[in-house]
Amino acid sequence: MAYWLFKSEPFKWSWEQQKAKGEEGEEWDGIRNYQARNNMRQMKIGDKAFFYHSNEGLNVVGIAEICRESAPDSTTDDPRWDCVYIKAICDMPNPVSLKEVKANPKLSDMSLVTSMRLSVQPVKENEWIEVCRMGGLDPNSIK
DNA sequence: GCCAACGTTGGC
DNA sequence: GCCAACGTTGGC
C-alpha cells in the first residue's frame, strides 16, 4: 500500500466537509498540476492519505482513503486532467502542524518540507508512521 | 496582505 | 527548445 498527502485550503474544501461526505467520498477535482496529477494516477483503492489544511491551520487534520482510482476530472473538458475520489477515515487525535513536521529531523526529507507547493504528495512509509505517532494515532489501528 | 518559490505560457 | 513574463500557491 502507498501513502499520500492531500492539501486543501479549509475555506475551499475542509476536513469537516470531507467527513460530512462519509462513505461516498468526494472527487478531488480542480488539480491543474502535472506532478500532482501523476501522483493521483498512481493511487490505488485503499491507499491511505493525510488530509492537510493549508493557508489556515497548517495541520495534518485527518486520515483519508482512496475510494476511486484516477478518472477524468468532471470539472473540465480538458482531457489532461484526471483525479481520484477520497473518503474520510478518522481524525488525527492531535493535529500535526507544519511547524512540528519541519522541526522533526526524521521528516526533513518529507515532500511537505521539500516541495512546499505540491498539492498532492507521496508520503514514505517511515514518514507516515512518524506523523501518525506525532498525532497520537497508532498506524496499525487505521482500518 | 505581502512576497518568495515555482509552475506554466508564449514569443522568438 | 530556451527563457522571460506572468500567474498561482502558500507560509508568514
Image (cartoon, coloured by chain):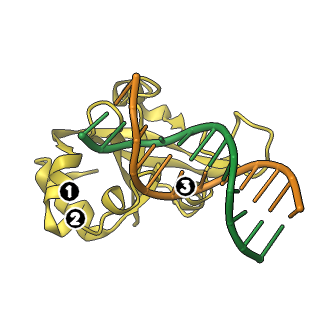
Chain colours: A yellow, B orange, C green
Say whether disc 1 or disc 3 marks the residue closer to the N-terminus: 3
- How far separated are the C-alphas under marks 2 and 1? 7 Å
Mark 1 belongs to chain: A
Question: Label 2's element?
Answer: helix
Looking at the picture, which amino acid does disc 2 mark?
Answer: Leu
Give the crowd class for mark 1: few <14, some 14-19, many >=20 residues within 10 Å: some
Q: Tell me, yes or no, whether the two marked residues, 3 and 2, touch with CB atoms within 8 Å.
A: no
Give the crowd class for mark 3: few <14, some 14-19, many >=20 residues within 10 Å: some
Looking at the picture, which amino acid does disc 3 mark?
Answer: Ala
Question: Label 3's element?
Answer: helix
Relative side of A75 to B11, left or right: left
Relative side of A143 to A121, left or right: left
- How far separated are the C-alphas under marks 1 and 3? 21 Å
Say whether disc 3 or disc 2 marks the residue closer to the N-terminus: 3
Residue where numbered disc 3 is placed: A36
Same chain for labels 3 and 2? Say yes or no. yes
Say whether disc 2 or disc 1 marks the residue closer to the N-terminus: 1
Question: Label 1's element?
Answer: helix
Relative side of A132 to A27, left or right: left
Q: Nearer the viewer, residue A89 or A10?
A: A10
Q: Tell me, yes or no, whether the two marked residues, 2 and 1, touch with CB atoms within 8 Å.
A: yes
The x, y position of residue C5, in whole percent, is: 69, 47
The x, y position of residue A120, in whole percent, is: 47, 52
Q: Nearer the viewer, residue A66 or A109?
A: A109
The quarter of the displayed image where residue A35 is located: bottom right
Q: Residue at x 36, y 29 (%)?
A: A19
Looking at the picture, which amino acid does disc 1 mark?
Answer: Lys
